[in-house]
């Protein structure tokens, strides 16, 4: 636990388990987060196409912000001058920020990785930057995020064992520097998570975890998955990665995923998730529903007078016909992405709430069976 | 008055006048509209980038829908099958629809105007259509609009007197056919407005009005203005057009305008307005405020911690800093247009409410003086 000045802590309560699945609560000074939890992604200080009060209405208790985007525009120093990211974007609940490393490698230009960190050019204006473990934590502290992530290297798969080992060991050294920087810069109540790497090698995942636990973090993430390895391989890696993870700390699977990915990862002991999928796919006309995804732009919905979910408590799901949503997308109207993002985020939050309830009542197996039957997913 | 089956009427109560300025209430079965009124434009079944409940929160009591857009996509017959435009777009207040004629002339391809009507090709899919006075009313009745407009011809200015006269006379013949169609197709409680044409010729405006009054409408519009003639010329035309207009019927100036245009037209006896400006300019970063318009993308707002209007009741105006809005526009985020449209529509509605109160209290001259002083507008 991290004691803050007002006596409020960052901590995790594990309430029930059902097989490997877990339900609990992450406590932060800005509010509690019931787990398993899904964190909508607010990349550049906004969950795209949504008002934060609607995000909150869906049941979301924590957002994710992207360090890479925010450090480049409007800059972390500017966000700090505005009173921090929460005030800047009008979200008073907890915020988790990533380290920026993943986006540097996927978005920036002329990047160069050394022991010191990653130097790169902004994809926005070409300006030059250096992201080190220390700078990443400094930026996350300027943003004022409640849960911060160590800088790590996230290699693509497949990767040879010796390369995966070298990369993982660099991430461990960066974890140690991140922790030192966090101890220097952070405020009471903030938390830092370490990231377990090691590709799809059990010995490397275990060595990574052991080294991180020795350093000591408030929570542990599983990184380096959902990078194209496929669901079956991801689940195989989780099956040997999560069991040795500290039982009393939250476990966060980064960047995952589709509903079936999330259900399967909860079944394998994961507590926290984030993914751009519900918002990104919503902007492109894909709606996630209890019976699987559908493309609202499909001609078969033109004359469909039914809403996406007539029993939902979400206005976007309940109060607009599929025919109207189809019209909005065909006409290129803002309201289409606005409504479908809202619907998707609500669907994800409902899925998490249903899983929490199933785990609490010892009927998670039945939940998974129902999920497979209603969505047609076979691998969960 | 138009008696409807439930005993509810379309009618207009003129409550107070102050000079030429008027305040009153348009009564419709779907709700009252306090005048002077500004109608946000919901072209294709949505006020772009806004939820209808937020539109209502701004104080808007009536929306405008565009017949041309809706008859092409999703089609008026389809909207009717969905239970009408109100249900389709989730707006339970009154809706005014235009005739479609103005958009046919400005947006469609291969259009041809005859005594019968206008034949044209859709700008969306090239399909061929014929818009006649009868078809326009049929479409507006299928949409279920509460206030409908006659089909008219809206010539560009400058225009020679003999051409303006011929065009105006065609509009009068179309007015008669529109009225006949309305009597055949409409439901109790719906209303039809005639449109005064005649360019900038006093004798033609008067002849147009006299002919329309003889046919008999629920309200009278001033058409053919705000088509590039400039504010001074528009006000000059209004000064001879509005005085002879029926005192006991609502007067609607179509497609106007900037705040100073509206204030000046209210001073010259107009009751109702519509314009895409607050929503369109909002999508492009222009905010209308009590001290005039500003471009939120301007670099000077990057570090501005103040909201657009800290005293506003509108969340978009009050709860977000100009610096955050600037960031949203620079980052190309949906939330920028969403917030600025909301702010602008709210500003327009506040302007109308302030004018209604000033007229009711006999201090409209003082209102205009304040408006000129705070906005720097000289011609109002």
Image (spheres, coloured by chain):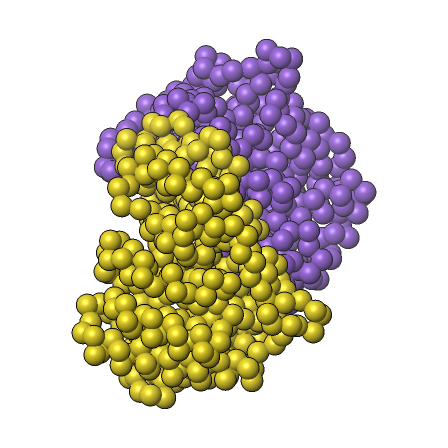
Chain colours: A purple, B yellow
Q: Is residue B52 visible?
A: no
Horizontal side of residue B303 vs A31, given as left or right: left
Depth check, front residue: A198 or B96:
B96
In which quadrant of the rendered view does residue B286 lie? top left
- Residue situated in front as seen by the camera: B101 or A366: B101
The picture places residue A264, in percent across and down from the top left corner, at 64, 49
Q: Is residue A65 above or below residue A185?
A: below
Q: Position of residue B109 (x, y in %)?
A: 29, 78
Residue B216 visible here: yes
Residue drawn at (29%, 84%) of the image? B112
| Front-most of residues A341 and A200 | A341
Q: Residue at x 51, y 15 (%)?
A: A187
Whether B344 is drawn above or below B110: the answer is: above
Q: Residue at x 57, y 75 (%)?
A: B80
- Residue at 29% across, 73% down: B204
Tally the marks.
0
For residue A96, above or below residue B171? above
Residue A68 sits above or below residue A359 on the image = above
**Residue A341, how many percent across, how many down?**
53, 52
Quadrant in which the N terminus of chain A appears: top right
Name the side, left or right, on which A157 lies relative to B93: left
């Amino acid at each position: 636990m991290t004691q803050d000045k007002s006596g409020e802590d960052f901590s995790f309560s594990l309430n029930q388990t059902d097989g490997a699945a877990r339900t609990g609560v992450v406590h932060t000074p800005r509010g509690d987060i019931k787990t398993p939890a899904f964190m909508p992604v607010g990349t550049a200080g906004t969950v795209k196409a949504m008002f934060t009060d609607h995000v909150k209405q869906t049941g979301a208790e924590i957002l994710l912000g992207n360090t890479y985007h925010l450090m480049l525009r409007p800059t972390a120093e500017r966000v700090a001058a505005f009173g921090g990211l929460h005030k800047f974007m009008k979200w008073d609940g907890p915020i988790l920020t990533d380290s920026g490393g993943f986006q540097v490698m996927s978005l920036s230009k002329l990047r160069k990785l050394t022991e010191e960190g990653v130097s790169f050019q902004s994809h926005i204006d070409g300006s030059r930057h250096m992201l080190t473990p220390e700078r990443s934590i400094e930026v996350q502290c300027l943003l004022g995020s409640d849960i911060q992530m160590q800088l790590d290297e996230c290699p693509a798969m497949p990767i040879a064992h010796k390369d995966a080992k070298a990369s993982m060991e660099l991430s461990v050294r960066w974890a140690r520097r991140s922790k030192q920087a966090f101890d220097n810069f952070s405020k009471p109540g903030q938390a830092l998570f370490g990231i377990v790497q090691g590709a799809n090698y059990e010995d490397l995942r275990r060595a990574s975890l052991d080294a991180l636990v020795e350093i000591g973090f408030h929570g542990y993430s599983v990184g380096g998955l959902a990078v194209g390895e496929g669901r079956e391989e991801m689940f195989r890696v989780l099956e040997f990665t999560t069991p040795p993870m500290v039982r009393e700390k939250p476990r966060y699977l980064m960047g995952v995923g589709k509903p079936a990915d999330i259900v399967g990862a909860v079944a394998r002991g994961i507590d926290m998730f984030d993914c751009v999928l519900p918002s990104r796919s919503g902007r492109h006309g894909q709606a996630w529903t209890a019976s699987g995804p559908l493309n609202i732009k499909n001609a078969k919905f033109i004359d469909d007078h039914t809403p996406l979910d007539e029993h939902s408590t979400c206005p976007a799901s309940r109060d607009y016909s599929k025919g109207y949503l189809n019209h909005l997308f065909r006409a290129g109207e803002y309201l289409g992405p606005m409504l479908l993002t809202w619907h998707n985020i609500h669907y994800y939050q409902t899925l998490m709430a249903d899983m929490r309830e199933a785990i609490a009542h010892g009927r998670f197996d039945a939940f998974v069976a129902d999920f497979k039957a209603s969505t047609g997913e076979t691998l969960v």
